[in-house]
C-alpha cells in the first residue's frame, strides 16, 4: 500500500511540474523584460536548439541508514544501543524543466539492527532473552522524480538571486539484499533476494535541501524513507519465524540520511534547476501571442509606457522615450547621474549642469553626435551581436566615418568564470564589434579592439556576480567606445 501511495504521489506531481516550461531567448523589441536583460528583450519559446542552460548532472553521496519499521530495528528504546549502518549512492540527473527532473540512482549500503552489533560477540545469555542481531547488505537501482519546490512555489516578483533550494523525491526500483542473523550459536545467512525479481521492487520518497556552491557544484542533504515491502529484510528470517512473530510489522522499512554533492555538466553558465521561474511567464505570453489570442500582459498596467509592467517596474515615472533596463529604470550608461535620454555625452561622464558632458576633454569639443557611440550588451558567455544592437552599431558606423578621430573598441565581462577566460571572452567581444564595423564601411585603421575582462565593471559592486540581480551583470557584459 505504501508503495502504491508513493507511485500515486509521483504521478500527480509530474503533470504540475512538467507544465512549468521555460523561455530563454533574448533579443530585440524591448517589450518584455527578463532576468537576462537590462534593456531590450524579446521572448521566444524554449527549445533544445536555443537553450542556454545545462540540464545534466552527476550526484554522489554517503550516509547512515536506520531501520525503523521492522521486528529488528536500528533505533533502540531502552534496550541495547543504536546501531548505525552505512550507505552510498550515485545518480545521473536530467532536468526536464526548472521545476522537475528525473534521476537514475544506484544505492549500496548495509543496515545493522537488533539487540547487538553482528560485528560483536553475541552475549552468553542471548538465547535466554532471545537477543538476536541482524545485518543486511543491499544494492538498489531506482528511478526518482525530482521536484524543485523552491522553483515551483517561488514568487515571480522576487528578482534576487537565491542559493538554497528544497527538493522532493519519489520513485520505484529494484532491491537486492542479503540478510544475516546472529545469536549465541553464530551468524548465518537468512534471506537472499536477487535483483529484477517480481518480489524485489521497492519504493522510496523523501526530501533534500541543496546549496549552490558555484555554477558547477551543489551540496545536498537528503532524508529518504525506503519502503522495502518485505518482512524479511531485517534478518528476522521467514515470515513466520520466531523473530518475525514478536511484532505485528508486515514490512521492513528504513530511513536513509545522506550528504552528497552534485556536479553540473555542460558548457553553459547556469543549470536549468537554478533557472529563475519568472521566465515561465514570458514563455506563456509568447505562446499565446503566437496563437493570436487576446492576453492581458500587465495586470496593473504600464503607467509610464516604458514596456515594463508596473507589477515589477522599479521606476514608475520613467520619462517618455527613455531606454530602460529590465527593472524599468532609465539607463545611465556612464553613471554620471544624467539618464541617457538627456545625456549629451552618453559614454563620457560629466556634471548634470553640463548635460552629462565633461567641462573639457582632450579630444576636442563634444557634440550631439556623440550619442551615436552607445555601448551594447551581450548574452552570458557569448560574443554574438544581437539583432537589437545593430541600430546602435549602424549609428556608430556613420559617426566614426564622418569624424577624423580613432577609437578604442573596449570589451568587458561580468565576474563569472576565471580571470583568464573572461579576458579572452572580452577580446572576442571587442573583435566581434570591430569586425562588424569594418564590414559595414569603417576603416580598420580607425579602430583598436581592446579586452579588459572583468577589470572594467560598470557595476563594481557585482563582484562576485551573485551579489547582484542579473540585469546588472548583463550591463557588465558589454562593448563600448572611447576616443584614442
Image (cartoon, rainbow, N blue to C red):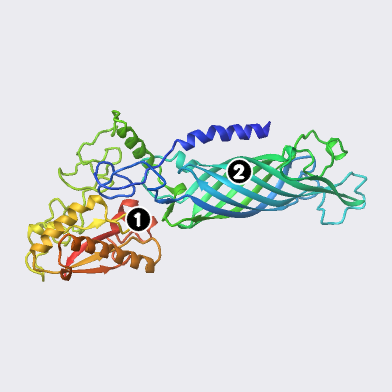
Badge 1 or badge 2: first in the primary sequence: 2
Q: Quadrant of residue 405?
A: bottom left
Q: In the image, residue 116 lies at what x, y percent? A: 82, 51
Circles 1 and 2 in contact, beta carbons < 8 Å: no
Q: CA distance from mark 1 to mark 2?
A: 33 Å
Few, some or many C-alpha atoms within 10 Å of disc 1 (few <14, some 14-19, many ≥20)? some
Mark linked to residue 143: 2
Few, some or many C-alpha atoms within 10 Å of disc 2 (few <14, some 14-19, many ≥20)? many
Find numbered disc 2 in the image and state the secondary structure of the residue it sits on: strand
Q: Quadrant location of the C terminus?
A: bottom left
Q: In the image, residue 109 lies at what x, y percent? A: 71, 52
Left or right of residue 402: residue 12: right
Quick check: can you spot residue 74? no
Q: In the image, residue 207 lies at what x, y percent? A: 58, 43
Q: In the image, residue 312 lies at what x, y percent? A: 30, 41
Q: Nearer the viewer, residue 376 or 300?
A: 376
Q: Name the residue at 32% across, 56% down.
A: 473
Find numbered disc 1 in the image and state the secondary structure of the residue it sits on: loop
Task: State how many labels appear.
Answer: 2
Q: Name the residue at 71% across, 49% down.
A: 139
Q: Which residue is mark 1?
A: 380
Q: Name the residue at 36% across, 58% down.
A: 381
Amino acid at each position: 500500500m505504501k508503495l502504491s501511495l508513493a507511485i500515486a504521489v509521483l504521478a500527480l506531481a509530474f503533470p504540475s511540474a512538467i507544465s512549468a516550461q521555460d523561455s530563454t531567448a533574448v533579443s530585440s523589441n524591448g517589450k518584455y523584460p527578463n532576468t537576462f536583460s537590462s534593456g531590450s528583450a524579446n521572448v521566444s519559446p524554449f527549445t533544445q536548439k536555443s537553450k542556454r542552460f545545462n540540464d545534466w548532472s552527476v550526484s554522489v553521496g554517503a550516509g547512515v541508514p536506520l531501520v525503523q519499521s521492522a521486528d529488528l530495528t536500528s533505533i533502540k528504546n531502552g534496550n541495547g544501543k543504536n546501531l548505525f549502518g552505512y550507505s552510498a549512492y550515485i545518480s545521473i540527473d536530467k532536468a526536464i524543466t526548472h521545476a522537475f527532473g528525473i534521476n537514475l540512482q544506484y544505492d549500496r549500503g548495509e543496515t545493522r539492527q537488533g539487540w547487538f552489533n553482528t560485528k560483536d560477540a553475541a552475549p552468553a545469555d542471548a538465547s535466554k532473552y532471545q537477543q538476536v542481531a541482524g545485518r543486511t547488505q543491499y544494492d538498489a537501482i531506482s528511478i526518482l522524480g525530482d521536484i524543485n519546490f523552491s522553483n515551483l512555489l517561488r514568487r515571480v516578483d522576487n528578482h534576487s538571486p537565491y542559493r538554497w533550494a528544497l527538493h522532493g523525491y519519489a520513485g520505484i526500483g529494484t532491491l537486492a539484499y542479503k540478510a544475516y542473523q546472529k545469536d549465541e550459536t553464530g551468524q548465518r545467512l537468512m534471506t537472499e533476494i536477487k535483483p529484477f525479481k517480481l518480489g524485489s521492487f521497492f519504493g522510496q520518497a523523501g526530501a533534500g535541501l541543496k546549496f549552490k556552491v558555484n555554477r558547477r557544484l551543489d551540496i545536498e542533504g537528503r532524508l529518504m524513507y525506503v519502503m522495502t515491502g518485505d518482512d524479511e529484510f531485517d534478518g528476522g528470517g521467514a515470515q513466520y519465524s520466531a523473530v518475525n512473530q514478536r511484532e505485528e510489522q508486515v514490512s521492513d522499512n528504513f530511513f536513509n540520511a545522506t550528504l552528497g554533492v552534485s556536479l553540473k555538466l555542460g558548457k553553459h553558465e547556469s543549470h536549468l534547476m537554478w533557472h529563475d521561474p519568472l521566465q515561465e511567464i514570458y514563455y506563456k505570453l509568447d505562446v499565446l501571442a503566437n496563437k493570436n489570442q487576446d492576453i492581458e500582459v500587465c495586470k496593473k498596467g504600464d503607467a509610464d509606457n516604458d514596456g515594463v509592467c508596473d507589477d515589477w517596474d522599479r521606476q514608475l515615472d520613467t520619462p517618455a522615450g527613455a531606454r530602460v533596463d529590465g527593472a524599468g529604470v532609465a539607463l545611465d550608461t556612464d553613471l554620471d547621474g544624467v539618464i541617457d535620454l538627456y545625456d549629451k555625452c552618453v559614454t563620457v561622464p560629466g556634471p548634470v549642469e553640463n548635460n552629462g558632458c565633461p567641462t573639457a576633454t582632450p579630444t576636442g569639443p563634444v557634440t550631439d553626435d556623440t550619442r551615436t557611440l552607445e555601448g551594447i550588451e551581450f548574452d552570458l558567455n557569448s560574443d554574438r551581436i544581437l539583432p537589437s544592437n545593430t541600430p546602435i552599431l549602424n549609428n556608430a558606423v556613420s559617426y566614426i566615418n564622418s569624424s577624423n578621430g580613432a577609437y578604442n573598441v573596449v570589451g568587458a565581462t561580468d565576474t563569472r568564470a576565471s580571470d583568464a577566460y573572461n579576458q579572452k571572452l572580452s577580446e572576442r567581444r571587442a573583435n566581434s564589434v570591430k569586425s562588424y564595423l569594418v564590414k559595414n564601411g569603417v576603416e580598420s585603421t580607425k579602430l583598436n579592439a581592446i579586452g579588459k575582462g572583468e577589470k572594467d565593471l560598470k557595476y563594481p559592486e557585482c563582484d562576485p556576480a551573485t551579489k547582484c540581480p542579473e540585469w546588472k551583470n548583463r550591463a557588465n557584459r558589454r562593448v563600448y567606445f572611447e576616443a584614442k
